[in-house]
Image: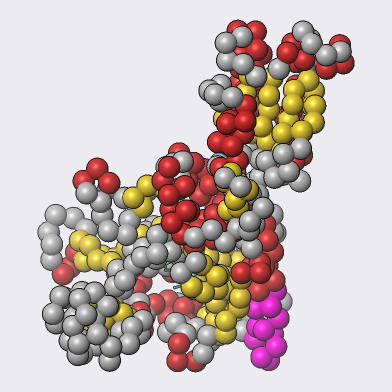
Amino acid sequence: MTSANGPMEKIVSLAKRRGFVFPGSELYGGLANSWDYGPLGVELKNNIKRAWWERFAERRDDMVGLDSGIVLNPRVWEVSGHLSAGFADPLVECKHCHTRFRADQIDVSKPCGNCGAKGAFTEARMFNLMLKTFLGPAEEQANVAYFRPETAQGIFINFKNILDTSRRQLPFGVAQAGKAFRNEITPGNFIFRTREFEQMEIEYFIPPPAREEDWNDYFEEWRKAMREWIREAGIDESRVHEAEIGEGERAHYSRRTIDFEFEYPFGRKELYGLAYRGDFDLRNHFKEPPYRDAQTGEAFWPHVIEPSLGVERTFLAVLLSSYAEDGGRVVLKLPPKLAPYKAAVFPLLSNKPALVAKAREIYDALRARFMVAWDDRGNIGKRYYAQDEIGTPYCITVDFDTLGEEGGADLKDTVTVRRRDTGAQERVRADKLAEFLHAAIYR
Ligand code: GAP
């Protein structure tokens, strides 16, 4: 079996062909660098978000969740620093073909990568990444609003609301997942960099550290927690590298950042970020200290550690890590928990009403609890391959043994379960299938 490092073209083509990711607005000639998630893509995306939410928001007793607005009061972005030069990229334009580039991503002393013109770039100017809109009918300055560029600020501005209602003591964290928008100068590489994307973020609040090691210990805990998540998501750890971001390179709010980088086919690039934001955000948003220690009565601004994860980059790293080829056969070795379908049910033959009826009965029973596919076209081998390609971990075949028409009486009401990764098959009692699947998927 060749390994998972399938090139991007194969992933993009599979994603489109099997309904994971479609080019955005295709019917109208497309919208550059935008993507829509199809019937299988939405399942994978939701499963990623659900697994993250379960792991971090629900299973930990030091975490709570939030779902704040995407459009917030514009003052939030002034105060957070996102409307300033700190949240801007250097933009240059080719004077010849007018293509725009990020000056920090090209060598401006070389010819334009689009038209080949030499010495043709404008001076770099800082371009703010906030995506602007107007609220209400009048397009005037007073109605300007922005789509959030990070979900984090919704958490900071609700810090006191959360504290007052959930009665948490430090340390505790708040999780939020949802859309974010950035007016990127050079989106691209499929779903890697887009202007509309989703984040899964945690702001983990800690007491102001008396000594350096105090925040560092929390930072290390979150570094490990992110590694555990990477394993749960089935992302190939041998392709994940941590990069310490230098002083001049960090976001305006960060005192320390580690990027978790992934080896994508187009290069080693950021997958996730882990930052120590100090008390930058809470101090800017709250004039008075928003937290009082229950024991000492001391009031202060908590500090924050922030693991920030992109949903689409997770999606891409998961697809790239699970893609494998076996001869002409493609297998997506997705973790069962993330797979769009947990199982597929087949009648051995589609022209035998008794087989179809029995298979349908099993399919309906399983569908009440799991995402399950039905297939009665072509031969069994083709059905297996079609399910392997979309990562379905188990295929269930109803045959004449199931009906008690062949084999011994002990095979009656049993089905063949075939495992995606090994091709191994076993007989399982039909009335134990739900139990079998549950144990295999959520082990
Ligand atoms: N609140 C911190 C923050 O937003 P960031 O490193 O700018 O930090 C966090 O973004 C994560 O969001 C990145 O590691 C990446 O996974 C994802 N992300 C950022 N910009 C993106 C874009 N234009 N398209 C897709 N994902 C993006």
From this view, report whether residue 119 is shown above or below residue 12: below
Query: For residue 185, which quarter of the picture?
Result: bottom left
The residue positioned 27% from the left and 46% from the top of the image is 26
Q: Which colour scheme is used?
A: secondary structure
Closer to the camera, 58 or 376?
Answer: 376
Q: Residue at x 86, y 13 (%)?
A: 408
- Count of residue discs: 0
- Residue 441, relative to residue 356: is it above or below? below
| Residue 275 location (% of width, % of height) | 55, 78
Q: Where is residue 376 in the image (x, y as percent from the top left)?
A: 56, 21
Query: Quick check: 30 left or right of 383?
Result: left
Residue 269 seen in the current view: yes
Q: Quadrant of ligand 1?
A: bottom left
Quadrant of the rendered image containing residue 238: bottom right
Residue 435, image x, y percentages: 76, 31
- Front residue of 60 and 231: 231
Left or right of 45 in this view: 110: left
Tell me which corner region of the image, top left, top right, bottom left or bottom right, holds residue 241.
bottom right
* Magenta span main SS: helix
Magenta-drawn stretch contains 215? yes
Picture residue at 73% right of the left edge, 43% below the top:
422
Instruction: Evaluate whether residue 164 shows in this view.
Output: no
Q: Out of 441 and 77, give the one closest to the viewer.
A: 441
Front residue (pair 30, 61): 30
Q: Residue at x 27, y 48 (%)?
A: 25
Q: Is residue 402 above or below residue 131?
A: above
For the record, the magenta segment spans 209-221
The reply to whether the magenta stretch includes residue 362 is no
Give percent across and percent down for residue 20.
46, 45
